[in-house]
Image: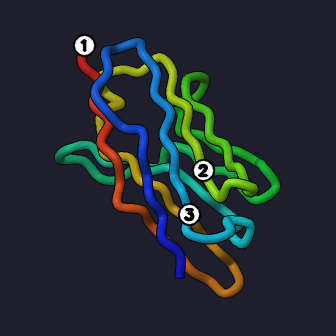
């Protein structure tokens, strides 16, 4: 088992930046994929960005060029740097860790990001 704890959310104005962190209770070197997802009120949860153990990244089209995902295996932490925030980025952001062997998905409880216009 592993616990994931997000932090770094808050209320910002459009155009500003935030950096989200997802701290794991143990080594994240066992997770083949880690990612950030978000859910806005009344909408389904959507993928924001993922990063593999090898460092390959993938982004939703809506955040490409503005958000950067990274993982620091020495600190057992996943990050999401969000620049140029827009009101439509307002959502609860959650991190997810996926292991292949043994297989398992783990979620954090989320952190609120609110962007005012």
- Residue shown at 55% from the left, 39% from the top: 80
Q: Nearer the viewer, mark 1 or mark 2?
A: 2
Query: Which secondary structure lies at badge 2?
Result: strand
- The image position of residue 117, as x and y in percent, is 24, 13
Q: Report the front residue among 66 and 112.
A: 112
Residue 12 location in percent, x, y?
A: 32, 21
Task: Answer whether labels 3 and 1 touch (C-beta < 8 Å).
Answer: no
Q: Is residue 33 above or below residue 26?
A: above
Query: Image height check: is 3 above or below 39?
Result: below
Q: Are marks 3 and 2 in contact (CB under 8 Å)?
A: yes
* Disc 3/disc 1 C-alpha distance (Å): 33 Å
Of the numbered discs in the image, which one, if any, rests on residue 33?
none
Residue 100: quadrant of the picture: bottom right
List x then y, in percent, for residue 110.
35, 54
Residue beneath disc 3: 24
Q: Nearer the viewer, residue 112 or 25?
A: 25
Label ID, residue 117: 1
The tag on residue 78 is: 2
């Amino acid at each position: 088992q592993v616990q994931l704890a997000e932090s770094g959310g808050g209320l910002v104005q459009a155009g500003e930046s935030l950096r989200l962190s997802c701290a794991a209770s143990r080594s994240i070197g066992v997770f083949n994929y880690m990612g950030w997802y978000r859910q806005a009120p009344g909408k389904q949860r959507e993928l924001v960005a993922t990063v593999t153990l090898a460092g390959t990244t993938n982004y939703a089209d809506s955040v490409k060029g503005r958000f950067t995902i990274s993982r620091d295996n020495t600190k057992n932490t996943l990050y999401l740097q969000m620049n140029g925030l827009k009101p439509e980025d307002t959502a609860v952001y959650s991190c997810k860790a996926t292991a292949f062997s043994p297989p398992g998905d783990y979620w954090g409880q989320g952190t609120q990001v609110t962007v005012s216009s």
